[in-house]
């Protein structure tokens, strides 16, 4: 089977792209391997008209909307390999191979769990990455932020914004290192407590955080924890040899969303640390507009679109 655009990933980005391209009469193949990055999230937030919607319900509604477009095919399959080049990509899933003129990657990222006792168990329940997604429901509690060496250059604005929702904010450290004096002064001026001893263990019960245990034996009561663990590309994206930025995200042209490999585009979480459902969906809409123009022009050059040159 041959398609105009194959979309890898069935989350908010992929679904948004499928809708936009479907409405432009492009032949679209949307594949969803079923593994949600935010599998522990119970609600989507900051998505206007969908605030508080469970992720599975969001996907159900989006897929139902796509049923209005017979030129859009949605399948729950995993793509194992992508070969070929612009205009003629071959996508392999098990024993099946399909072809597409263009590829749009919306596969998200893989969060790597930190080697701190209790981290994996509490991830997504009491440990979050984004206060916009997981802040309002747990406001006015004691919050902690885990400072890692990789985040040292840009952590300050993130921590300061937490004070707008939490009555008590603590900065913990993954390892022992010296914080810039200016940052320390700013944090303390904002009423943020700083603990220099590294985090040894996260103490929790029934998926709820109770305290942070430090290497020096200090036990700090804490209910909500924010952390930005390392992220990596899914294996399929990693296999494509695309250019990545210094943080490991797929580098794309800011206007076209095209990657370093002609004909392969990317949108959503795999391209930026600024991650969220509505942000991913918007970037996929942007990519779809460019893809539609690109593919339509190609079809016209090939004489593959119907024309009407008769008198009116």
Image (cartoon, rainbow, N blue to C red):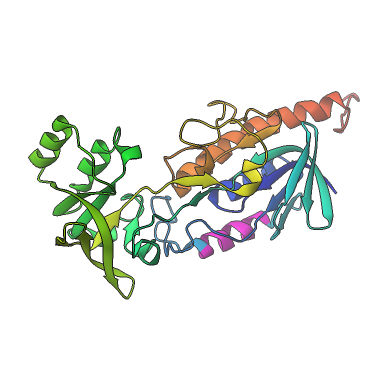
Name the quadrant containing residue 44: bottom left
Extent of the magenta region: 56-66
The answer to whether residue 135 is seen in the rendering is no
Where residue 116 appears, as percent x and y from the top left, is: 34, 59
Q: Would you say residue 65 sits in the magenta stretch?
A: yes
Name the quadrant containing residue 207: bottom left
Q: Residue furthest bottom?
A: 206
Where residue 99 appears, as percent x and y from the top left, is: 82, 43
Q: Is residue 43 left or right of residue 100?
A: left
Q: Is residue 181 left or right of residue 225?
A: left
Residue ID at (71%, 31%):
263
Residue ID at (33%, 50%):
227
The quarter of the rendered structure image containing the C terminus is top right
Of residues 228 and 280, the one nearer the viewer is 228
Per the picture, the main secondary structure of the magenta-coloured stretch is: helix
Q: Is residue 178 left or right of residue 127?
A: left
Q: Would you say residue 74 sits in the magenta stretch?
A: no
């Amino acid at each position: 089977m041959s398609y105009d655009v194959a979309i890898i990933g069935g989350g908010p980005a992929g679904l948004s792209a499928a809708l936009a391209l479907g409405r432009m009469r492009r032949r679209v193949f949307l594949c969803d391997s079923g593994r949600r990055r935010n599998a522990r999230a119970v609600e989507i937030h900051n998505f206007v008209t969908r605030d508080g919607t469970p992720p599975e319900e969001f996907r159900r509604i989006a897929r139902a909307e796509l049923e209005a477009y017979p030129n859009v095919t949605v399948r729950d399959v995993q793509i194992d390999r992508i070969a070929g080049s612009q205009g003629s990509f071959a996508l392999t899933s098990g024993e099946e191979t399909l072809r597409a003129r263009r590829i749009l990657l919306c596969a998200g990222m893989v969060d790597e769990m930190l080697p701190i006792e209790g981290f994996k168990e509490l991830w997504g329940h009491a440990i979050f990455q984004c206060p916009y997604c997981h802040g309002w429901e747990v406001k006015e509690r004691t919050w902690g932020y885990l400072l890692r060496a990789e985040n040292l250059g840009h952590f300050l604005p993130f921590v300061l914004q937490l004070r707008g929702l939490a009555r008590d904010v603590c900065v913990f450290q993954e390892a022992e290192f010296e914080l810039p004096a200016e940052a320390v002064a700013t944090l303390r001026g904002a009423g943020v407590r700083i603990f220099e001893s590294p985090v040894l263990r996260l103490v929790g019960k029934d998926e709820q955080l109770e305290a942070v245990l430090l290497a020096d034996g200090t036990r700090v009561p804490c209910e909500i924890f924010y952390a930005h663990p390392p992220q990596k590309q899914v294996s399929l994206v990693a296999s494509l040899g695309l250019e990545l930025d210094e943080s490991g995200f797929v580098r794309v042209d800011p206007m076209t969303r095209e990657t370093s490999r002609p004909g392969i585009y990317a949108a959503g979480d795999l391209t930026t640390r600024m991650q969220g459902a509505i942000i991913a969906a918007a970037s996929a809409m942007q990519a779809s507009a460019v893809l539609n123009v690109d593919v339509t022009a190609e079809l016209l050059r090939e004489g593959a679109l119907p024309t009407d040159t008769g008198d009116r």
